[in-house]
Image (cartoon, grey):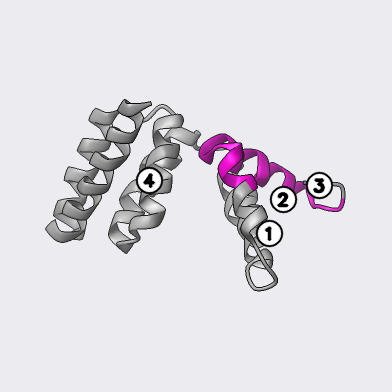
Amino acid sequence: MNQDDKSDAWKKGYAARSKVLGEAYVEKAFADADDLTMDLQNYLTEHAWGASWARPGLDFKTRSMLNLAMITALNRPHELEVHLRGALRNGVTRAEIKEILLHTAVYCGAPAALDSFRIARKVFAEQDAT
């Protein structure tokens, strides 16, 4: 992907997004984008990843831990699956993920936590198989 015409925030965001989610995932997101969704991919890269994830103050592991709780609260299973993989890549342990998801049961409700545990089990099984 040609990054020459991109802002510094976009470039930092692309690097952060690739580190957390894996370069293959990010490349596929851009390759699959069309006229409808390309602006969203660029927006997320520059703003969510470049202006937030790439900021100093919190390391990627902490940001991943926060994401798991927030995405559980929002009940967004696809995004949770993506960010579970990222959290593991960022050094969040399975034991820490378990505790995060248990904590969400109190504040987000049992149904949200149950769904998140199901997704975590799936991601862990996939990792164990590779």
Query: Is 14 one of the magenta-colored residues?
Result: yes
User: With respect to residue 75, does 12 lie above or below?
Assistant: above
Judged by its main secondary structure, the magenta piece is helix
Q: Position of residue 84 (x, y in %)?
A: 37, 41
CA gap between label 2 and label 1 equals 7 Å
Image position of 120 (left or right of 130): left
Instruction: Spot the residue most to the right.
Output: 4
Q: Earlier in the sequence, mark 4 or mark 2?
A: 2
Q: Are marks 3 and 2 in contact (CB under 8 Å)?
A: yes
Furthest residue in direction front, as rendered: 129
Amino acid type, callout 2: Trp
Magenta residues, start to end: 5-27
How many neighbours does mark 4 have within 10 angstroms: few (below 14), some (14-19), or many (20 or more)?
Answer: some
Where does label 2 land, which residue? Answer: 10
| Residue position marked by numbered label 3 in the rendering | 3
Q: Which residue appears at 65% of the width and 48% of the height?
A: 50
Q: Earlier in the sequence, mark 3 or mark 2?
A: 3
Residue contact between numbered discs 2 and 1, judged by CB atoms under 8 Å: yes
Amino acid at pointer 3: Gln
Task: Report how far apart the C-alphas of labels 4 and 1 lie in the structure.
Answer: 23 Å
Q: Are marks 4 and 2 in contact (CB under 8 Å)?
A: no
Q: Which mark is residue 42?
A: 1
The x and y percentages for residue 96 are 27, 32
Residue 103: horizontal and vertical position, in percent?
A: 19, 46
Task: Measuring from the top left, give residue 31's x and y in whole percent.
Answer: 67, 54
